[in-house]
């Protein structure tokens, strides 16, 4: 390995530029990602995730149980956002955020995912017509609408799946490459399932 990434001290890791990171091998890049997350260098970690995601087999396969759920690694929304370089506006009601590179990261409930003509789809936001969607008018709902508009303008977003109606545990290891589209007054995310990828192992 070009540098001992696992013992890199705080402060020095922040000297890594995008060009320098991109020259690393995949194994070196994974090691740098783990080190950046340990030192809470969120910008470096976000760059590592972005570059790994663009490489074939950049992330190692994630293990899943017989039900197709992650065998381990489910974390809180706050932790998931931290792992992806996102600072949520509110720890309680934020369901997404924006990285420093401008990428929109959204959480999706796995029980709301639907089959689509090609791949999968999930409603991100819809208007509160006759009280049908009261959450849409809440601070979290209005923030989601803002993020949907941003993602629509960018043409893409990243998605993280939430498991459990009450526990709100996030599979932070699997990143969905979302296409966001507007259907009448609703915003939808669509994606083609890929092989599961891992950001990092979480005990």
Image (spheres, rainbow, N blue to C red):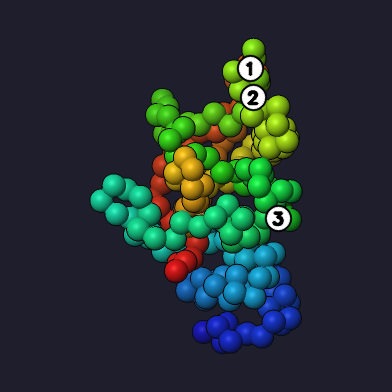
Residues at discs 1 and 3 in contact (Cβ within 8 Å): no
The residue that mark 1 highlights is: 131
Question: The residue tagged with tag 3: helix, strand or loop?
Answer: loop
Residue 141 x/y as whole percent: 67, 33
The residue to which callout 2 is attached is 134
Residue neighbourhood size for the residue with mark 1, other residues' Cα within 10 Å, grouped as few (<14), some (14–19), many (≥20)? few
Image height of 110 relative to 133, above or below = below
Quarter of the image that includes the C terminus: bottom left
Q: Who's the residue at 66% across and 27% down the image?
A: 136
Q: Is mark 2 on a helix, strand or loop?
A: helix
Residue at 54% x, 55% y: name it.
76
Residue 29, by quadrant, is bottom right
Task: Assess disc 2: are there few (<14), some (14-19) or many (≥20) residues with their C-alpha within 10 Å of its C-alpha.
Answer: few
The one of 156 and 19 positioned closer to us in this rendering: 156
Q: Which of marks 1 and 3 is in front?
A: 1
Alpha carbons under labels 2 and 3: distance apart: 25 Å
**Does the residue at mark 2 contact the one at mark 1 (Cβ under 8 Å)?**
yes
Give the residue furthest to the front: 166
């Amino acid at each position: 390995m070009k540098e001992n990434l696992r013992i890199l001290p705080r402060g020095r890791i922040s000297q890594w530029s995008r060009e320098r990171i991109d020259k690393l091998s995949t194994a070196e890049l994974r090691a740098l990602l783990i080190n950046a997350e340990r030192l809470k260098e969120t910008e470096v970690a976000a760059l590592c995730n972005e570059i790994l995601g663009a490489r074939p087999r950049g992330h190692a396969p994630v293990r899943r149980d017989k039900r197709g759920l992650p065998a381990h690694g489910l974390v809180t929304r706050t932790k998931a956002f931290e792992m992806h370089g996102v600072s949520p506006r509110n720890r309680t009601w934020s369901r997404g955020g924006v990285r420093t590179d401008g990428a929109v990261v959204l959480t999706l409930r796995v029980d709301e995912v639907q089959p689509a003509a090609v791949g999968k789809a999930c409603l991100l936001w819809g208007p509160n017509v006759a009280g049908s969607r009261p959450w849409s008018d809440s601070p979290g709902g209005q923030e989601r609408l803002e993020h949907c508009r941003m993602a629509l303008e960018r043409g893409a977003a990243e998605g993280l799946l939430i498991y459990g109606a009450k526990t709100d545990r996030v599979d932070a290891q699997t990143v969905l490459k979302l296409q966001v589209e507007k259907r009448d007054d609703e915003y939808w995310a669509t994606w083609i399932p890929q092989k599961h990828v891992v950001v990092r192992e979480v005990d």
